[in-house]
Amino acid sequence: MKAARCLFNSRSALYRVFVSPAGLLEVPVSRAAFTLTQRSLLVSQPRFLTTTSPRERNAKIGKLAVEATEDDGKEEENLKYDRRYTTAATIKKANRDRMPQDHEITDPKIMVIDNGPPEGPLNTRFVLSKLTADESLRMLEPYKPADRKKGTRETLALCKIVNKREEYAHKQQVKATKQAQAKAKTKAMELTWAIGSHDLTTKMRQVAGFLDKGSKVDLTVARKKRSKTQVSPAEAEAILAKIREELLVTGVREHRPAEGVVGQTMRLYFEGTKKT
């Protein structure tokens, strides 16, 4: 049987004097400060409803941090790469009407074509530093990141060193060729207001043949030179109506408004349909 403990011994007296009053002191804390502290603790600390070890809790915190920073787009879920590389999606997002060139190319490393097969990987800054004033670095194909799901490896951007003078000369040549081809496809024909019915039918057949092949026809109708015989305004209107009646069939149209005056000099512009 345990002996009764004395309530007035020296140990109890010292405890009541020095320890107990300190524990009973009230620290004034405002309601607002307490609410703010409580709220911040709720936000900053994840809630765990099950008893877990410190290691498991740290693992869960790390997982939450990763999930919070993941991109919402499923397309780039498995595409982990240096964002300095330019992808097809980057170009589309920038609304560019051409591929990047020269210092617009931010890829750290690229494959380069320079009068031969592709070389590389090469440092982009190094390649740019070696270009002459007449040369330019043009991207042909953008960077393709590795895809873990598809099991594909990354493909560096393919670029080409071009000579700007030669490129300009080539563009001018192509432009001149197109203009020459367009001019060759336009046929010019002339007739007079005093043309006879039979001759008009023959001319219209020739014009229809050009239009049927997809060519354009510039038809000029004018007064007969050094002739005293002139047609009346009504006769000129009848000739114009006959021309349009013969030519404006299915697939033929006037691609430009007529110019000039009926009975004097007038130009009509017809366009046919290409046969495929």
Image (cartoon, rainbow, N blue to C red):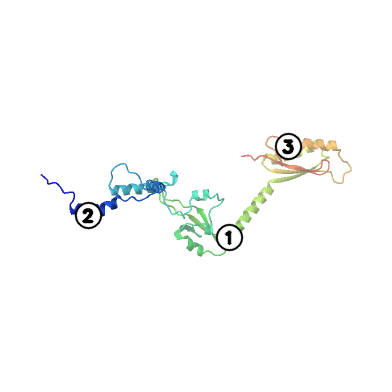
How far apart, in angstroms, are the residues tagged by discs 3 and 2?
125 Å
Residue 253 is tagged as: none
Tags 3 and 2 in contact by the CB under 8 Å rule? no
Where does label 1 land, which residue? 164
The residue depicted at 28 percent of the width and 52 percent of the height is: 21
Residue 74 placement (x, y as % from top left):
43, 44
Q: Earlier in the sequence, mark 3 or mark 2?
A: 2
Tags 1 and 3 in contact by the CB under 8 Å rule? no
24 sits left or right of 257 in the view: left
Q: Secondary structure at mark 3?
A: helix
How far apart, in angstroms, are the residues tagged by discs 2 and 1?
96 Å
Residue 247 is tagged as: 3
In this view of the protein, which residue sits in the foreground, 221 or 130?
Answer: 130
The amino acid on which the numbered mark 1 sits, given as a three-letter code, is Lys
Quadrant into which the C terminus falls? top right
Foreground mark, 2 or 1?
2
Q: Secondary structure at mark 1?
A: helix
Foreground mark, 1 or 3?
1
Tags 2 and 1 in contact by the CB under 8 Å rule? no
Residue 78 seen in the figure: no
Residue 235 placement (x, y as % from top left):
84, 36
Where does label 2 land, which residue? 14
The amino acid on which the numbered mark 2 sits, given as a three-letter code, is Leu
Q: Earlier in the sequence, mark 2 or mark 1?
A: 2
The amino acid on which the numbered mark 3 sits, given as a three-letter code, is Leu
In this view of the protein, which residue sits in the foreground, 242 or 50?
Answer: 50
Residue 216 seen in the figure: yes
Looking at this rendering, what residue extends furthest in the right direction? 228
Residue 66 placement (x, y as % from top left):
38, 48
Residue 128 placement (x, y as % from top left):
51, 62
Other residues around mark 3 within 10 Å, as few (<14) / some (14–19) / many (≥20): many
Dividing the picture into quadrants, the one containing residue 165 is bottom right
